[in-house]
Image: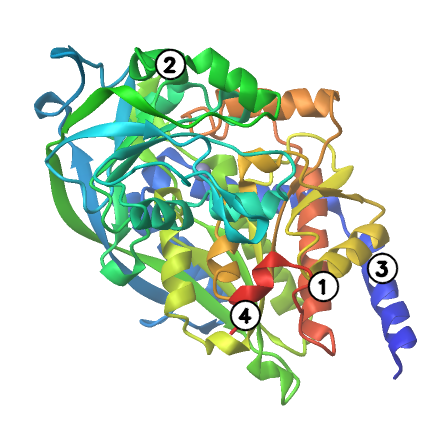
Amino acid sequence: MNCIHRILLLQLASLSLVRAADYTAEGKAWWSRVQILADDKMEGRNTGSEGYRKAAAYVAGEFEKFGLKPAGVHGFYQPIEFRVREIQEQQSRLELVQDGKTERLSLSDDANFGLPPDMAPKVEAPAVFVGHGLVIPELNINDLAGCDLKGKIAVILSGGPKEIPGPLKAHYSSTKQQWQALRNAGAIGMAVVRNPKSADIPWSRSTLARLQPAMSLADPKLDDAAGMKVSIRINPEHADKFFAGSGHSNSELLKLANNNQPLPKFPLAVTIGARATVKRTNVPSMNVAGLLEGSDPVLKREYVVLTAHLDHLGIGEPVNGDKIYNGAMDNASGVASILEIARSLTTSGAPLKRSVLFLIVTGEEKGLQGSKYFANHPTVPKKAIVADLNTDMFLPIHSLKSVRVFGLGESTLGNDVRAICSAFTVEVQLDPEPDRNVFIRSDQYSFIRQGIPALAFGFGYEPNSPEEQLHKEWLKNRYHAPSDDLNQPVDKAAAAQFNHILLALAQRVADAPQRPQWNADSFFRRFTH
Ligand SMILES: [Zn+2]
């Protein structure tokens, strides 16, 4: 069969999928899975919790029912050991010292501690504002040039110039990349002011998460923040406490950043004093992996990975009297989609050439830990993983007019998703908000770092549309809040339609004669082994 016939057939196949699907019924089936995973009984599925274990057992049970092959280490499970750190706020303090005067800061209102694995119990250090703190050799950008950071804390305003392509900026803003550059320059820690313009959650809500346990992989080789003695998140509205006496103000810096103008670099007039008492424990958790073997004698030894994270934030600070962070959209929705796709592929009878690995990961909310662990310890040969298609909080909160694709311009997977969406007469949208760094904020990034082409998806919307308003309000009110639960408006039929697009994409990639390739001009091509 030649190429053109193949493409025609593929298109016909996806067209018939479009016609045959009963989105209302399938939307209900999808939602019934979300209802199980986001039930209060699952207690918010925090990494290492009993609720997470129950949810993982449900996923493994479904995989077994579908007839998938166990692809973990113990059956469907890939166990992972986590290190846990909890701040003891009563025995901790953060201070600014200037001209011999000490100002004690509020750990809820002024700033919070991040809790990197190497957090020191006591740090007293001068600080330097380093702009966006970006070091991007290929663009000759070095915000640290000329800054003396030896033994100091780097203070950073999140974001970066508009000219820098989104994925590149996202990559160099990742903890691993940014901290490596700062550490090489001699810094002992970092303090970040998040630009409210690109922050998904207002400070008043994000500060509630400060008492959540921080977790990292027990394997120190996989620690992105090695050597970071202190990590501070500064409330943008109180940042002037840090800038006092420096000759600069937070509003000036924000104005420059928002007008895309260069930021000054300057030493702070204050010295930062941090004492952190941290309770350290270990906890086990697990990924869940199931395999649908391919039918082609050669291509079956290659794997298309479909990922979604199962963990959420567990039980935390109550908001409006509710303390269970159910994570219905984040990301019971994505896990339910993967389960629906697995069900569909195992019952449709149409065999795929390549194998499909369904991978449900833990620790995403703790910094993409479960996917990072898998990508470093894959249960199938790493070189044989041809793509990762990740679904995280795709937000079916209105009808599906367009799919927003992260990584669209990076690999041939972009052509695949365009072809599928056009068969479904749904538009494809490039990431219009690169400063939210979505490309590095979910599990696809763990695969990208290993050289594996990947995409992530969400519901698209036009600027200044009613749909945009819905998304903004959702992020402000429900994202990482207890109200991301089962009592929220969801367009279930639209979710089913989205699932069909993802299914058709997985089929196309699994059946294609060639494995996906990074585009020649993609920055991420360099990670290919
Ligand atoms: Zn999340």
**In the rendered structure, which amino acid carries the disc numbered 1?**
Thr
**Above-or-below relation of 15 to 266:** below
Q: Of discs 4 and 3, which sits in the foreground?
A: 4
**In the rendered structure, which amino acid carries the disc numbered 2?**
Asn
Query: Which numbered disc, 1 or 3, marks the residue that appears first in the sequence?
Result: 3
Which residue is tagged 3?
A: 16
Which residue is tagged 4?
A: 528
Position of residue 374 measured from the top left corner of the image (x, y, whole percent): 40, 64
As helix, strand or loop, the secondary structure at mark 1 comes to: loop
Asked if ligand 1 lies within 8 A of label 1, the reply is no
Q: Do tag 1 and tag 2 residues touch (Cβ < 8 Å)? A: no
As helix, strand or loop, the secondary structure at mark 3 comes to: helix
Label 4 – label 2 distance at C-alpha:
48 Å
Which residue is tagged 2?
A: 320
To which quarter of the image does residue 61 belong?
bottom left
Q: Please indicate, yes or no, whether residue 33 appears anywhere in the rendered image.
A: no
Count neighbours of disc 1 (C-alpha within 10 A) and say few if under 14, some if 14 to 19, many if 20 or more. Answer: some
| Residue sitting at x 41%, y 73% | 379
**In the rendered structure, which amino acid carries the disc numbered 4?**
Thr
